[in-house]
Image (tube, helix red, strand yellow):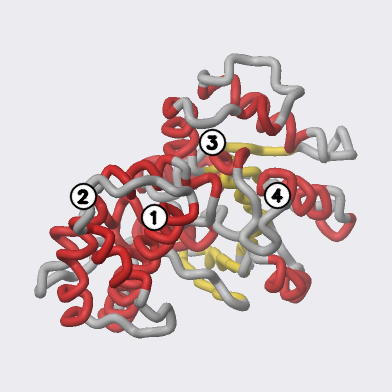
Amino acid sequence: RQVKLLLLGAGESGKSTFLKQMRIIHGIKFEPELVKEYQQVIYQNVVKGMKVLVDARNKLNIPWEHSANSENGSYILKYDNSMTLDTRLFTHYAPTLYNLWKDSGIRRAFERRREFQLSDSVQYFLDNLERISRVDYIPTNKDILHARKATKGISEFTIPINNIPFRFVDVGGQRSQRQKWFQCFDSVTSILFLVSSSEFDQVLVEDRKTNRLEESKNIFDTIVNNLVFRGVSIILFLNKTDLLAEKLKSGETSIRWFFPEFSGDEKKLNDVQTFLLEYFRSAKRDPRKPLFYHFTTAVDTENIKVVFNAVKDT
């Protein structure tokens, strides 16, 4: 027998990150060629991320702190997104990136990131720029966890746990990828449905107008009420707790602006999480079908270790 776990959820909810954690937790090393691949992904995450920030600063009319960075900004905007970055090229960009990230104009744009599309990992990499831009840099597990690359198609990974093969199936969450989901619905044991809980104030990459949480709930609705999954346990991961907590502290936004029915304390993590849980739970039409849930931070190995131990038993 085997256990088949299907990872579902909208784009950028943390499915692939969870799968990477499964490898790390069960001691399956990333092959050298995969690490090399992630290194290029990381380089691209950083340069593309800065390009987005520079562009946003322009559009939001935020002044530069240092006028010299105007030139640095123009230089980064010329970067062609399809260009592969090797170490030599990235170290060439590094000082420019470093100066831009220190500029309060870019920082202010970053604080307003919900108004445009910026990957969650950009801050982590820019904060670690000095280490990442060394010539002998090799990505750590933590770096690999933060590396963001949209999943196209279906990726699978089997890990033997207590002599039982656990087959994890990760599918792309972007709208264009979802028609591939039903190919994986065969003989599923459990569905892990991931939600980026920090996205209550963001819109989709795909259409730039739909609220990301709403999209997530609509997908969840189709899964949790699907008769195909009558006997399948569905486990809801309200993910990115770390980013949610940070967002609530920032004072830049409020859940009430987007969900006026929220009646708790908008600065209290617990209140917001309780609201989000109920928001998703209300989609479930069969009162007898149990819904398991966890508040998670997919980039935090210790957190996922604890959560996965609980999941194994559901």
Q: Tell me the crowding category of disc 3: few under 14, some 14 to 19, or many 20 or more residues within 10 angstroms, Cα based.
A: some
Query: What amino acid is found at the position of numbered circle 2 in the picture?
Result: His
> Count the marks: how many?
4
Position in image of residue 135 (x %, y %): 10, 74
Q: CA distance from mark 1 to mark 2?
A: 25 Å
**Residue at x 43% of width, y 29% of height:** 250
Tell me, for residue 216, which label it has, or none. 4
Q: Nearer the viewer, residue 179 or 118?
A: 118
Q: CA distance from mark 3 to mark 2?
A: 41 Å
**Residue at x 62% of width, y 29% of height:** 255
Screen quadrant of the N terminus: bottom right
Secondary structure under tag 1 reads: loop
Nearest to viewer (mark 2 / mark 4): 2
**Residue at x 14% of width, y 58% of height:** 130
Query: What amino acid is found at the position of numbered circle 3 in the picture?
Result: Phe
State the residue position of label 1.
121
Q: CA distance from mark 4 to mark 1?
A: 20 Å
Tell me, for residue 295, which label it has, or none. 3
Query: What amino acid is found at the position of numbered circle 1 in the picture?
Result: Ser
Q: Find residue 37 and report its image quarter.
A: bottom left
Disc 3 to disc 2: CB gap under 8 Å = no
Q: Tell me the crowding category of disc 2: few under 14, some 14 to 19, or many 20 or more residues within 10 angstroms, Cα based.
A: few
Up-down: is 61 above or below 208?
above
Q: Tell me the crowding category of disc 4: few under 14, some 14 to 19, or many 20 or more residues within 10 angstroms, Cα based.
A: many
Upstream in sequence: badge 3 or badge 2 = 2
Position in image of residue 206 (x %, y %): 67, 64
Q: CA distance from mark 3 to mark 4?
A: 16 Å
Upstream in sequence: badge 1 or badge 2 = 2
Secondary structure under tag 2 reads: loop
State the residue position of label 2.
66
Tell me, for residue 281, which label it has, or none. none
In screen coordinates, is 178 left or right of 237?
Answer: right
